[in-house]
Amino acid sequence: MTSALAVDRAFAAIAFKRRIAYKAQWLIALILGGGAMLVSMAMWRYLLADGALSGYDWDSMRAYIIIGFMTATVVFGAADWHIADRILDGHIAIDLTKPVDFQRARAAEYVGSMVSTVPTVLVGVAGAWLLFDPPGPASATAGLLTAVSFVLVFPLAFGITYLTVLVCFWTKRYLGVMWLREALLGFFSGMVIPLAFMPSWLQAIAWALPFPHFTTTPAAIYLGRVDTAGALGLLAAEAAWAVGLWFGGRMVFNHAVKKVTVHGG
């Protein structure tokens, strides 16, 4: 067990160092993400100037947007292309000969790359807090449970990303798959607009998917829109999705590598 954890830490450290080697990415992510957050703030400030929409007033929306910025920066800033390239360029054939679990190694790398986005998140959130002064969590318990939800975003994001990356075994392409995943995640998570603004049937579809746990779940807990029991239920669902996606990815991978084609051979 100790040896396996040491291998995980090594993979995560390599991925982290690979990402921080390009410091310009941090600046670009901060500018793009921060700019999008400012535009969103300005839009919702205008829309909510006269009151509230579906239970969201200007105070709660400020916190909601910042939470969305945090999760979007972490999720969209991770290095999924590195995993896809191992399949597309044939390195998967070499990986299969190594005494290292492919999925676990890629998970460690993915988490390491996600951790590299934390400085961008901290700078962006600090700036947003100074500029917009959003409300704090509904309670100390809500703040703690929000942090737990945010931590669960890491394995949840990997589970979804890993499954979409495995599609490369059949498509031999990844760009379109990535765009589709990001579009679905952005819409059904509530990053684009809160799910509360959508018709009930569309909300039902969203909650049947893992995506709401990226933004809607931590925001609902933070703002006190659910009580402690409801928050624990949302966290349990988030954790269940992370576990289910992990084992789902393992089954798909085991099926995909029954036949691996490399350079047409």
Image: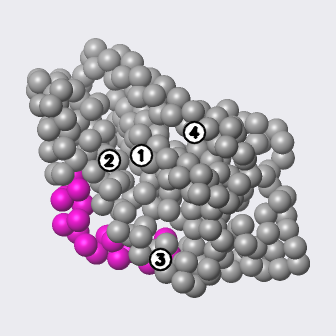
Magenta region, residue range = 15-34
Residue drawn at (62%, 81%), measured in percent from left and top?
Answer: 132
**Can you tell which of label 1 and label 4 is closer to the viewer?**
4
Badge 2: few (under 14), some or many (20 or more) residues near its Cα, within 10 Å?
many
Check disc 2 and give the amino acid type: Val
Residue 173 appears in the rendering: yes
Extreme-bottom residue of the structure: 131
Q: Earlier in the sequence, mark 2 or mark 1?
A: 2
Could you say which disc has been placed on residue 235 in the image?
Answer: 4
Extreme-right residue of the structure: 50
**Can you tell which of label 1 and label 3 is closer to the viewer?**
3
Badge 3: few (under 14), some or many (20 or more) residues near its Cα, within 10 Å?
few
Q: In this figure, which residue is indicated by the disc labeled 2?
A: 111
Q: Earlier in the sequence, mark 3 or mark 4?
A: 3
Label 1 – label 3 distance at C-alpha: 21 Å
Residue drawn at (41%, 22%), measured in percent from left and top?
Answer: 247
Q: Earlier in the sequence, mark 1 or mark 3?
A: 3
Q: In this figure, which residue is indicated by the disc labeled 3?
A: 126
Check disc 4 and give the amino acid type: Leu
